[in-house]
Every structure is written in C-alpha cells, then in structure tokens.
Amino acid sequence: MIIRRLFAAGLLSAAVLLWAAPSFAGVDEGKKAFDANKCAGCHQVQGPAKEKTIKDQLAKKGPELWYSGSKFKSGFLEKWLASPQPIRPLAYNSVTDRNRGDHPKLSQKDASDVAAYLMSLKSPEVKPLGIAAVESPKGRIIFLKKQSCYGCHSMRVRGKMAGGLSGPSFIGATERLNPDWVYSYLKNPKAFKPVKMMPVYSGILNEAEMKELASYVGSLN
Amino acid sequence: MRVKWFSLSIITFAFVLSAGASTASGEAVEDLYRFHCAQCHGLKGMGDGPNATKEMPVSPRDHTSAVEMKKLTDADIINAITEGGPATSKSSLMPPYGKTLSKAEISSLKDYLRKLCNCKGK
C-alpha cells in the first residue's frame, strides 16, 4: 500500500515538474533572447529606479521593464513582441516626434520566451490586491472630469481615438495593464519612475479614488 | 586679505543670483518647462503642445500672450500650477503639480512665464 502511494506521489511530482519545466526554460531562454536582441540598449531590467534628474530620465531610450511582471497582464507581452503596435502616440521622451512604430519584431519563439522572462520581473511595491477592471462611474468621473486624465492619455470614444498624445494611450489598456499596478503607480509613482512628465497624484487623490481610477483605467479598451 | 574674501563672497553671491534660472533641485527652469509644461503649452509656450488636439474642450494657454497673461496675478499662476486649473476656475485639463514640483520650482516657473509673456500681473 505504502509502495503504491509512494509510486503515485512520484508520478504526480514528475508530472508537476514536466508541466512547470517549460516555463522555467522560457524565463532562461527569454533572458538569452533579450540579451541577443540587445533589448537592454533601450530598456532597463534592473531595479530599483535610479534616475534623479530630468537629464537622467531623458537619457533613457525606452520604458523601463524591471517591473514588467507586476505591470502587464499575462499574455499581452508575448502578443505585442511578436506584433508590436505603438502604445505611445509620441516617441519616448519626446513632445514633438511621432512614434514611428519601429520597435523590433521578435519571432514567435523569442516573443514567447522574452515575455516569460519579463513577466518574471516583479516589484514588491505591487501587492496583489485583486483590483477588478471595471468601467465604474466613479473612476470615469475622475478620469474625464475631476483630473482630466484624457488630456494626456488617449482613449477610444465611439470607435475613434480621442485625447492627448503625450502619455501612453489607454486604448487596449484592459489587455495590457494590471489594475493593481496602476494603483501602485498612482500611490507611489517614484518607486517606478522617479522623474516623470505625469504629475504625482498621491496626496491629491485619496486611497478610494486611486483604486477607482486604477479599476477604470484597467477596463479601457 | 579680508577684502579679498569679501570680494570672493560678493562674486559668489552674484553668481548664485545670476543662476536664477536654476531651481533648488538643480533643474534649470527651462528644462522644467520643457519636461512638464511643453506637453500641453508647447516648447515655446505658445499653447501648441501635442496634447492640444482638436477635440479638446479648451486650448492650453498661450504663455507668450501678454494680453492673456496679464489678466493673471502672480498668485493665480502659482495657484494654477500647484492646485491645477480648477483652483483658478479653469479647466481640470491643467493638472495639479503641487505634489510634483517644489514651491521654489513653481515660483521659478511663474517667473519664467512672466519672461515668456514679457508682462506683469494685474
């Protein structure tokens, strides 16, 4: 009886290992593909953030990725890396140049591996609060009326893009952003990006409002 | 010797004053403007930044317009930057920078706006 149980437990462990192994391989291979594609030339993967001045921020060629696993939703990066579409209407750090949409496109295998690697990079700042993506009336009022977030972040209105161009677009945000990260970014933005064009809203919006807004942003499609 | 030290202090003081374009944070006010304000107000302050899109309900203020800018007191400008547009009965499209910039930086931006419009407040 004991032998049979041990055998069953062994089989179960082997199955778990086999199931889990590809994801570990993806992370390691993803790191190799990330290096081989020279992604670090534009994207930081080492946290925490070190920028202190505007000059430090302007020296960055692309968004920092050291908290990707906390920021992005599962599945988004793999799809995006295989078929990149501009998220920012303007070129990174520019207020004059359009985003030319020339981000390198990775093969499906590299996209899958690099996504696995990037999703393994997490920030302890982002707690799993389980904020649901909901197009709540309260979040909508903050976004459209109280703080006019659309002034910098474009969104889809009746099928068309509307809003400002300087911030990342929220068209498709529901597939891209983890609402828990949006909340953490609103609450303690300097932990992620110490010098940034977006104003600090912590101390302006209260806790409940930041959660409502995170939930609303996470629902935008 | 004492005279020499005195002269040196005067020179240092004059240098600090002449570096008025730099704020306590060390950022030049022009850089603060280009980084934070230009996204709506444009690099030259003419209200033509990339966020001034056609569908916006209001246009960003043209900071080079003396006619418009002289309607505002210095306190109005500081309030609008610190608390956002609604603090001066204007649009919330002007966001609050009170938790982003220091008081010294906001004050230096007010001076910079006065330079751009070449005007004084009412």
Image: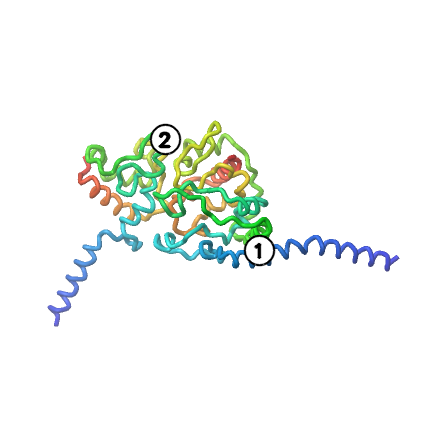
Q: What's the mark number on residue B52?
A: none
Q: Which residue is mark 2?
A: B56
- Front tag of 2 and 1: 1
At 11% across and 68% down in the image, what residue appears? B3
| Residue found at x 51% / y 45% | A181
- What kind of element bears circle 1? helix
Amino acid carrying mark 2 in the image: Met
Q: Tell me: B10 left or right of A178.
A: left
Quick one: A1 or B62, which is closer to the camera? B62
Against A153, residue A125 (above or below) is below
Crowd tier of the residue under label 1, counting other residues whose Cα lies within 10 Å: few below 14, some 14–19, many 20 or above: many
Residue lying at the far bottom of the rendered structure: B1
Q: Is residue A36 shown above or below B87?
A: below
> What is the secondary structure assignment of the residue under circle 2?
loop
Residue B88 visible to the viewer: yes
Disc 1: which residue: A30
Q: In the rendered structure, which amino acid carries the disc numbered 1?
A: Gly
Same-chain check, marks 2 and 1: no
Viewer-nearest residue: A213 or B51: B51
Find residue A19 and report its horizontal and vertical position in percent: 70, 52
Observer-nearest of B46 and B8: B46
Query: As drawn, which residue projects farthest toward the left?
Result: B3
